[in-house]
Image: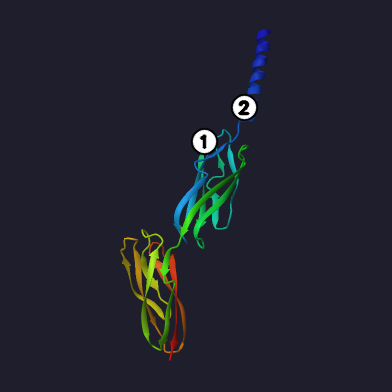
């Protein structure tokens, strides 16, 4: 009789322990870094901020929502459901076009972690221009019809290690017959010879000259060239 009672008690205890264990079991999200410094990045180039996370709990972790603070940063979770001890990433692609200087953005995460249902991740960067042009605009003044004139444009790269002029896209009256890299202790820069050929008709010249960065054909520095064609 005693042994049977003891058996009942042990069975009840096992059920209680199982119930307690089930109540305690939960997902637990942990991140390697919740804030990332991307450093200096060139404007116009997309850059990734990658957040690595893990389910350190003992039941399935679910990412139910990933939202960025603006349309310039598209955030997405590689996996939305993780088994215990599984790791994954959340990648934010930041479009730097139109930005300059120090920039910070936020990514909001919603999970089924009972202790961290809402998490705020962040990243920051210093956005630098592809290049600084001096002068910013080239004024050729007055040119007589069919007259040609040259001027010099100096291009100072935002990132001297990667920037390289491969070509300059001409316009109707404006071209760049030559360009060269100049080594300087303060930092390498480029010298571009800009040529304007006045047409046979009087009028105003207002055109763009596009300087193409060879490290990325989609990256261009633009300078406005203007002047007047007179009789």
Return the x and y of residue 128 as percentages of the image width and height. Answer: 45, 60
Q: Say if 106 sits above or below 6 in the image.
A: below
Instruction: Give the distance between the C-alpha atoms of the residues marked 1 and 2, in whole angstroms.
Output: 18 Å
Viewer-nearest residue: 45 or 54: 45
Q: Secondary structure at mark 2?
A: helix
Name the residue beneath numbered marker 2. Answer: 21
Q: Residues within 10 Å of mark 1 (few under 14, many from 20)?
A: some
Q: Is residue 184 above or below residue 195?
A: above
Of 68 and 151, the residue lying toward us: 151
Foreground of the two, 176 or 90: 176
Picture coordinates of residue 196, whole percent (x, y): 39, 81
Whole-percent x, y for residue 202 in the image: 45, 89
Which quadrant is the C terminus positioned in?
bottom left
Residue at (37% x, 60% y) in the render: 160
Q: Is residue 188 above or below residue 17?
A: below
**Residue visible at 65% across and 14% down?**
7
Task: Give the label on residue 85, or none.
Answer: 1
The image quadrant of residue 151 is bottom left
Q: Image point 50% across, 52% down: which residue?
A: 124
Crowding near pointer 2: few (<14 within 10 Å), some, many (20+)? Answer: few
Please, what secondary structure does the residue beneath circle 1 have? loop
């Amino acid at each position: 009789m005693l042994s049977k009672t003891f058996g009942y008690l042990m069975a009840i205890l096992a059920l209680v322990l199982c119930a307690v264990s089930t109540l305690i079991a939960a997902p637990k999200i942990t991140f390697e870094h919740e804030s990332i410094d991307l450093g200096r990045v060139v404007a116009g180039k997309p850059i990734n901020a990658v957040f690595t996370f893990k389910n350190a709990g003992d039941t399935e972790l679910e990412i139910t929502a990933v939202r960025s603070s603006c349309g310039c940063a598209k955030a997405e979770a590689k996996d939305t459901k993780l088994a215990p001890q599984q790791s994954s990433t959340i990648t934010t692609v930041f479009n730097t076009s139109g930005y300059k200087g120090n920039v910070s953005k936020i990514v909001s995460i919603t999970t089924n972690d009972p202790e961290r249902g809402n998490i705020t991740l962040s990243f920051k960067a210093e956005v630098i221009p592809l290049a600084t042009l001096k002068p910013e605009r080239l004024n050729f003044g007055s040119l007589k019809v069919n007259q040609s004139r040259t001027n010099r444009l100096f291009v100072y790269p935002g990132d001297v290690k990667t920037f390289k002029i491969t070509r300059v896209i001409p316009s109707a009256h404006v071209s760049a017959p030559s360009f060269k890299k100049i080594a300087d202790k303060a930092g390498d820069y480029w010298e571009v010879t800009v040529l304007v050929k006045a047409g046979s008709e009087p009028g105003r010249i207002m055109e763009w000259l596009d300087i193409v960065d060879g490290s990325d054909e989609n990256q261009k520095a633009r300078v406005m060239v203007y002047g007047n064609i007179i009789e």
